[in-house]
Image (cartoon, helix red, strand yellow):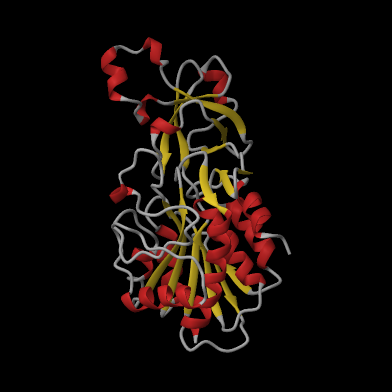
Amino acid sequence: MMELLELTRELCALPGISGEEGKVAEYITNCIKDCCEYKIDLLGNILAWKKGKNPAGKKLLLNAHMDEVGFTVCFINSDGTLRVHPVGGVDAAVVVGRRVLVGEKLLPGVVGTTPIHLMDAAARDKGVKMDDLYIDIGVDSKEEAEKLVSLGDSVTFEPGFEAFGEGYLMGKALDDRAGCAMLIKLIQSELPYDCMFAFTVQEEIGCVGAKAAAYTLQPDLSIIVETTTAGDLAGVAESKKVCALNKGPVIPFMDRGTVYDREMYARAHRISREKGIACQTKEGVYGGTEGRSIQTAAGGAKVLAVSLPCRYLHSPSCVLAQQDMQEELKLLEYLIEEFAK
């Protein structure tokens, strides 16, 4: 079977903004089709049932989202450049000059804006806004662009996945293709108890897919396998660093959308200590996960998040630590045994 790193690399190479997850779903189903039962629902979620050594006492669901942030084409200028709208939370300041791929044909382009030496002082002080951005696809007129691009076409960052430094990974879409890779590895392994898995769509625009997946599966318990912002960077105050790379997966007690089940939270941290697995909590209440959707679907469910600390989240160059991925995969194996029984 493919190693976790190579699996993550191949998943990150695929284009798949919210609503355009088809290529990612096809790849995942090819990886799991011989290891479990699965179906794809009308939204595009992959719902999988994995038989374990024993029947489960509780219906446990592990989920990760397939979509990534990006853009969609919303207007073509007279000079052939494209105006775009963000899909998910994209910071305009980090994408200027980045290479992108447009539409089904993966047409190459670059994100542009007014050069700083042509801005007046007031514009420079304001910083780059999303409305200031355009995509240059190398044509000179609207007519030429219309032959290549249609309104509504997706725009993704160009893949550039690589290992670097001392055990680090960088690339686009690590949120949450790294989570998808770990779920694939779990499905491909022998599990102690029956377990359910969901690879969900449209998380980045409001956790849409998870609502439908949880309503269909109706779990008792759910573990959201995600990434979360790490602030272990120069110039960040200690109280704002939240979590750090190479300290293991992050198990939060709360975020802006979910208060996680206190018993699951305590048991997960206890297991990490007993098994000698590096683990940390999120030192603050920030962000959100699909937990908000899953815990309120149908009759409700208890939820827990287990996330990889990630620098430069929602950028073309997310950064993870390989050690954190390995520790999280081990922790998830123990959590399945703990909660499913």
Q: Nearer the viewer, residue 143 or 10?
A: 10
Q: Quadrant of the N terminus?
A: bottom right
Q: Is residue 84 above or below residue 302?
A: above
* Direction right: furthest residue: 1
Q: Is residue 166 above or below residue 37?
A: above
Hey, which quadrant is residue 120 in on the image? top left
Measured as percent of width and height from the top left, residue 222 is found at: 43, 73
Hey, which quadrant is residue 149 in on the image? top right
Measured as percent of width and height from the top left, residue 250 is found at: 42, 62
At 50% from the left and 46% from the top, the residue drawn is 17
Inspect this view and state whether residue 41 appears. no
At 32% from the left and 25% from the top, the residue drawn is 127
Inspect this view and state whether residue 327 appears. yes
* Direction left: furthest residue: 122
User: Could you tell me how many numbered marks the image carries?
Assistant: 0
Measured as percent of width and height from the top left, residue 277 is found at: 51, 69
Q: Is residue 225 above or below residue 107?
A: below
